[in-house]
Amino acid sequence: MQRPTRRGIVTGAALTAVAALTLSGCAGSGAGESASGDQTITVWAWEPTLEQVAADFEAENEGVTVELVNAGTGNDQYTALQNAIAAGSGLPDVAQIEYYAVPQFALAGSLADLNEFGASDLEDTFTPGPWGSVALQDGVFGLPMDSGPMALFYNEEVFAAHNVAVPTTWDEYLEAARALHAADPNLYIANDTGDAGFTTSMIWQAGGQPYQVDGTDVTIDFSDEGTTRFAELWQQLIEEDLVAPISSWSDEWYQGLGDGSIASLTIGAWMPANLESGVPDGAGKWRVAPMPQWEAGANATAENGGSSLAIPADADNKELAYEFIEYANAGDGVQTRVDGGAFPATTAELTSDEFLGAEFEYFGGQKVNEVLSASAENVVEGWSYLPFQVYANSIFNDTAGQAYVGGTTLTDGLSAWQDASAKYGAEQGFTVN
Amino acid sequence: MTVSSPPAVARVAADAPKVKRKPRFRNSWTGWGFLAPFMIVFALVFLAPIVYSLWLSLFRNQLVGGNAFVGLDNYVRAFSDPQFWGSLFRVTLFLAVQVPVMLFLALLVALAIDSGRLYGRSFFRIAIFLPYAVPAVVATLMWGFIYGTRFGLVGNINEALGIQLPNPLSPDLVLASIGNIVTWEFIGYNMLIFYSALRVIPTSLYEAAEIDGAGQFRVIRAIKLPAIRGALVIATIFSIIGSFQLFNEPSILQSLAPNAISTSFTPNLYAYSLSFSGQQYNYSAAVAIVMGLITMLIAYVVQLRGMRKDG
């Protein structure tokens, strides 16, 4: 899912990133000249909390300069990175890459295997979901920076006003959706116009494993049990007009979240900061509950968004680059970023009392991190993304998205998505199915 | 005399080059020297990108397997690609409906302003031209808000009147909605082309028509329209090229109507998503070249027809 992680940060990022650029730009030219040549690393990232981390890292390591460059967000940056890789020049030493895009770069041989720096020792440092996203096949192709274990964010005021209980299972969710929409036709339990990241995360939680990747052998199968479970439930929501036809991150979306017409979001743990900055009207009304379950009493969750820091295979200064990403993602940098509002991927921070005990004013004083942290521990294992997920996601609305405008059913749409993805995979030289 | 003089002229003409051939040959290189600054820029800016696209289109770069020369494979694939033909059909439909409507309206406005019977002529001229000065991106965003069925103008109308207007951003209507935006943007531009062509018609023709007792419609049919045929042809060609290159409007509306506007909605959008999300630069180059050729062909046919009527 490309959007969540970036938006997670985008609003604030726009300003801070510009500031970061200017600051690091000045620092870069000054310090870079005085230090001995190869002590400069370039970091391409849009995560705003890295700015402070880079400053701290420079302070701790004399003569080291970290040039933080915002080369675009998500896809834009991947395009730039792909071009730099193809050209063989202008490569950064560190690049921020979202989990769903890691396989694409790793498989093409564009990322350094961090095992040569002993990255596999860090396995227990990170929660299983994010680690599984960067540890692919025999290598480790990045260190997890943040994570997005899913939870149900809901507007308590709306649920209470209509006497609807907060759903704990997906069946209850469907009932709640009907009850809310029946009480007020302008009220929806969620918005959805077809979002590849959300759909894959939902299938992930339902136990589906549509993508199997073994080297260049790829299997795509959207007919397994987990996928079917999700598709059947969601088809009912779509058919009964229970999800608002509003795209996430649009102006209408923010308005809907603010005025209560979109009553809940099933989304990654990076959402709190977004709600606080993007939906000021919702202050005090929103709460966080565990993700609804397929089996009553279960606690399965999935990841939604999140990104890693990786090192391009042909980077100039890989050792220093690794030192930096270890510092930022597994060392002192983590606390700095948590203080800056990031949701970490490291077990230590996720289980620390300070983190868990933090009370969020926006959420009516709720200790939100307790719920989110529990979700991080229960991410279903065994999920993998396609080695060409970036493109596959871009054609989701051409195929599966048609189910949202009545052109087809979700099951058939997913099947069309499967075919289109398989076709692209074959064109790119993969052995598909 | 009339018989004898042509051979004499021919003889002189034939002799002249013989004498001066050598110096002229040297001079021709001097000429190129003077042209060089232009030719270098021309080659770099105009020819190099086209040659590079052609070159790119002969290869295939795969995630697995790398880069390989494939000859005309990309073109073969383009000709059997339903998504490409689907997008071409869509812009052709757009062309067939939107362009005539837009040009007709622009002509109507130009004739009205030119008639001299309109009160506040310069105000209308400016007001109708103004949308052209609004950047396409801004215009599309603005229309996107207007089209919104929940919080946009359409939504407000629905709420105020208690009716249910069809959603302009639904798959069935989105092409028409884009046509509306483009018409709004370019009526002023085309109106100005027509209007300036109308202004250069000599007033003596109108006076003559008046003496002959011709009415306004007769003047339009017999004087004005034939006189601005050139402008009509030019505006039509620009509009054809514009339609085939449709990109900004669907690309921006895509975020509002992701299921109505596919990644292959127009040929340009298709080429864009092929290269920037799919990293299929080679195939994308082939699609762009095929599209360029089709556009040239149709524009050429229209020009030929326009010119023939002229003669």
Image (spheres, coloured by chain):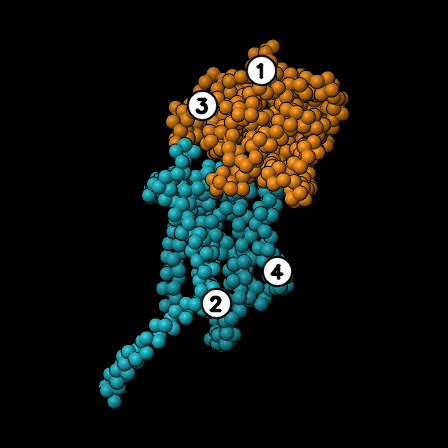
| Mark linked to residue B163 | none
| Mark linked to residue B224 | 2
Q: Chain of mark 1?
A: A
> Secondary structure under badge 4?
helix
- For label 4, the residue is B126
The span from disc 1 to disc 4 (Cα, nearest Å) is 63 Å
User: Which circle, 2 or 1, is nearer the viewer?
Assistant: 1
Q: Label 3 amino acid? A: Val
**Which chain corresponds to the colour orange?**
A
Q: Chain of mark 3?
A: A
User: Which circle, 3 or 2, is nearer the viewer?
Assistant: 3
Q: Chain of mark 2?
A: B
Residue A47 falls in image quadrant: top right
- For label 3, the residue is A213
Left or right, residue B126 beside residue A335: left
Labels 4, 3: one chain? no
Residue A41 falls in image quadrant: top right
Please name the color used to draw chain B. cyan
Q: Nearer the viewer, residue A55 or B225?
A: A55
Q: Label 1 amino acid? A: Ala
Q: Label 4 amino acid? A: Ile
- For label 1, the residue is A300
Q: Nearer the viewer, residue A182 or A277?
A: A277
User: Which quadrant of the figure contains the N terminus of chain B?
Assistant: bottom left
The span from disc 1 to disc 3 (Cα, nearest Å) is 23 Å
Image height check: is A86 above or below B3? above
Image height check: is B226 above or below A301? below
